[in-house]
Amino acid sequence: MKIKSAEFVMSNSEVAKCPKNRIPEYAFIGRSNVGKSSLINMLTDRKSLAKTSGRPGKTQLINHFIINDEWYLVDLPGYGYARVSKTSKKKFQKFITNYFEQRQQLVSAFVLVDIRHKPQTIDLEFMQYLGENGIPFGIIFTKADKLKPNAIDNHVEDYCKELLKTWEELPPYFITSSSKKIGQDDVLNFIDATNEE
Ligand code: GTP
Ligand code: MG
């Protein structure tokens, strides 16, 4: 897929206020600081379409971007950010689960995980939650530039082994680096293929 246009549409704190039309959408979720917003910029060839930051907790709202006037890309806040109060954590969880459970336009979610880390409970639980709610998802390994090629293979293999303890089949997965521009075609081609179904 060629990116011809990529524009910010709106930010929302509630799923009820998100765009009402039936354009298919793809949402990016994962721990704070895993690189969701950077990945969105890499995928769309835009330097600062989505706001990024070295400090976790940058993205706070549901952000819709329209790509090629055909599909929405959705940047979400990260989960597992420790420096917020318990009440706001609860409120936040509700806001995310409302999005996933109510957004009928959602074709697929992408769960981002840092390729350097061993499988984390919070990510595995989130994938389990998506599965239980019948929400298709793919896994995007981020920051692949931080590992040597053979270490990438080992980490991905270990991750898949862990997944196969609870899942019968592996979800689609992608190895990416936003700083080295790795994996752009793989992710965009997957979006293209599922968008036509
Ligand atoms: P929140 O919005 O806070 O949930 O974070 P996020 O997941 O959107 O992360 P963001 O894209 O803002 O990136 C977090 C940090 O990771 C920034 O300092 C980025 O420069 C860095 N980063 C993101 N992607 C990559 C990558 O592919 N390689 C490397 N080396 N650093 C990256
Ligand atoms: Mg972000």
Image: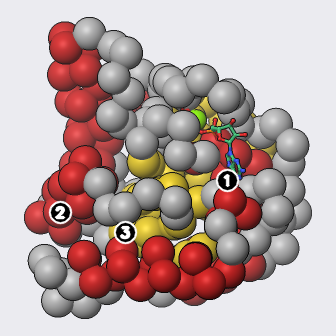
Mark closest to the chain's N terminus, 1 or 3:
1
Relative to 175, say whether 51 is above or below. above
**Residue identified by numbered label 2:** 128
The residue lying toward the viewer, choosing from 16 and 96, is: 96
Q: Who comes first in sequence, dot 3 or dot 2?
A: 2
Q: CA distance from mark 1 to mark 2?
A: 23 Å
Q: Quadrant of the N terminus?
A: bottom right
**Up-down: is 118 above or below 173?**
above
Q: Position of residue 195 (x, y in %)?
A: 54, 77
Secondary structure beneath label 2: helix
Where's ligand 1: which quadrant? top right
Report the disc number at residue 137. Answer: 3
Q: Quadrant of residue 42?
A: bottom right
Mark 1 residue CB less than 8 A from any atom of ligand 1: yes
Which one is earlier in the sequence, the residue at label 1 or at label 2? 1
**CB of residue at label 3: within 8 Å of ligand 1?**
no
Residue 190, numbered label = none
The answer to whether residue 107 shows anywhere in this view is: no
In the image, taking residue 47 as reference, residue 26 lies left or right, namely left
Residue highlighted by disc 1: 39
Q: Secondary structure at mark 1?
A: helix
Residue 193 location, quadrant: bottom right
- Toward the viewer: 95 or 115? 115
Is any atom of residue 75 visible in this view? yes
Q: State the image coordinates of residue 116 (x, y, percent, origin top left).
A: 52, 60
Left or right of residue 64: residue 100: left
Which residue is at 52% across, 63% downward?
Answer: 115
Q: CA distance from mark 3 to mark 2?
A: 10 Å
Residue 99, percent across and down? Answer: 32, 41
